Amino acid sequence: MDFSLTEEHLMIRDAARDFAQTELLPGVIERDDKQTFPQELVRKMGELGFMGIMVDPKYGGSGMDTISYVLIMEELSKIDASASVMVSVNNSLVCYGLEAYGTEEQKQKYLTKLATGEQIGAFCLSEPEAGSDATSQATTAIDKGDHYVINGTKNWITNGGRSDVYLVIAQTDREKGHRGINAFIVEKGMPGFDIGPKEDKLGIRGSDTHTLQFNDVKVPKENRIGEDGFGFKFAMKTLSGGRIGIAAQALGIASGAYELALKYSKERKAFGTEICNHQAIAFKLADMYTEIEAARMLVMKAAWQKDKGENYDMASAMAKLYASKVAMEQTVEAVQIHGGNGFVKEYHVERLMRDAKITQIYEGTSEIQKIVISRGVIKG
Ligand code: COS
């Protein structure tokens, strides 16, 4: 067993840290306030290889491992979780899905642009009536011979407005249940595909979240991913890796808030000394550090299992469940350590606290992670 990072991992982590400090930190409060994220920053993340971290270089990716992905996600999330969710969705749901299950033609046509950040992708599973209960897809994709016709609504879609490529899950044959579900590549601008207004959110406000409408959208048959009926398993398999990304995001949000709280506690004085010298604050710091380290172990272990080619369904669910809980609890503590200043935007911790909440909801709620873990535990 070896807990140390390689030289290469340390360099990747430092590059991500440097980018987050120099490029993401300036303007992060304004982006949160105005709910924007400039394309220029997406382009820069693409140049650094952050949009296709694990993709094979022959498709334009960086060819790195999942540990590197986690390190990059943590560093970006310490500063700007809106940036990191864009990276996470593009990497683990879209690029991974296409690379693992797409045809060579699909990879050449779509993955090569998505992996460089020239184009951005979205993953469209959730619906008004099907979030956790993902087999109950109301969106239909009717087989018309050489094409499918898609009708329905998708909700809360990250990168919903700014994407070029959308992976859409839809029901082809309701009688077959989850075996009648397919996944399709839909391009922005296909007739009948409309993007609804941007959602006004509690957190990750810089990220672009939309409802999507599909009205008789004609999608060529070659845009289906995998065999007929593979769509639900495609969604489950990609989400399993996605959960490592969100767990790393939660870890970053928690450690970002902790680092701010630690620094503040060494500067702020009360009762004649820095507040870190009061046991009430020192014990909070001890708990925060311990919880974050425990979360880091689970996140790294899930990434390591994926890199080793082992099954990581339970490991990613445990990492996401625990890291998101730590993010929520420890960002609240970071605000508390900051006192009145914690409630003010310029100290950043209130944003991290708002951003933390979504990590317990998207890519499977904490309750869904417990279903996955408990089934795995019982099955043995
Ligand atoms: N990898 C591969 N296949 C999987 C899988 C995985 N990780 N998880 C489930 N499957 C397969 C099952 O093996 C089953 O196939 P077979 O009948 O051929 O064996 C099929 O998928 C259906 O699985 P199951 O019966 O377990 O489905 P359930 O309806 O009970 O749902 C959960 C399972 C709850 C785990 C699933 O619906 C889920 O993850 N929901 C949350 C979805 C989500 O994350 N939503 C957020 C949207 S993205 S922001």
Image: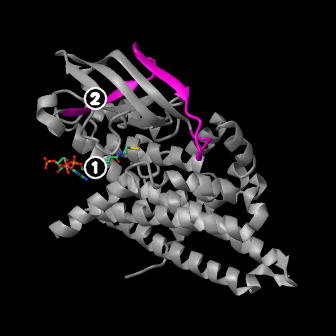
| Left or right of 336 on screen, residue 88 | left
- In front of the other: label 2 or label 1? 2
Q: Look at the image and tell me whether residue 158 can be seen.
A: yes
Disc 1 residue crowd, few under 14, some 14–19, many 20+, Cα 10 Å: some
Closer to the camera in the image, 111 or 245: 245
Query: Measured along the vertical axis of the image, is residue 305 above or below residue 179?
Result: below
**Rendering quarter of residue 273:** bottom right
Residue 89 in the image: x percent, y percent?
45, 44
Q: Residue at x 75, y 52 (%)?
A: 345
Reading the chain from its start, which is encountered first: label 2 or label 1? 2
Magenta stretch: give its range. 181-207
The extreme right residue here reads 272
Disc 1: residue Cβ within 8 A of ligand 1's nearest atom: yes
State yes or no: discs 2 and 1 in contact (Cβ < 8 Å).
no
Judging from the image, what secondary structure is the residue with disc 2 in?
Answer: loop
Residue 15 in the image: x percent, y percent?
62, 59
| Left or right of 335 on screen, residue 171 | left
**Rendering quarter of residue 229:** top left
Q: Residue at x 39, y 41 (%)?
A: 94
Q: Residue at x 53, y 54 (%)?
A: 357
Q: Which mark is residue 237?
A: 1
Judging from the image, what secondary structure is the residue with disc 1 in?
Answer: helix
Residue 354 falls within the magenta-colored stretch: no
Residue 55 in the image: x percent, y percent?
40, 48
| Left or right of 239 on screen, residue 275 | right
Residue identifier under label 2 = 138
Closer to the camera in the image, 310 or 349: 349
- Identified by mark 2, the residue type is Ala
**Rendering quarter of residue 129:** top left
| Left or right of 141 on screen, residue 286 | right
Disc 2 residue crowd, few under 14, some 14–19, many 20+, Cα 10 Å: some
Residue 96 in the image: x percent, y percent?
36, 46
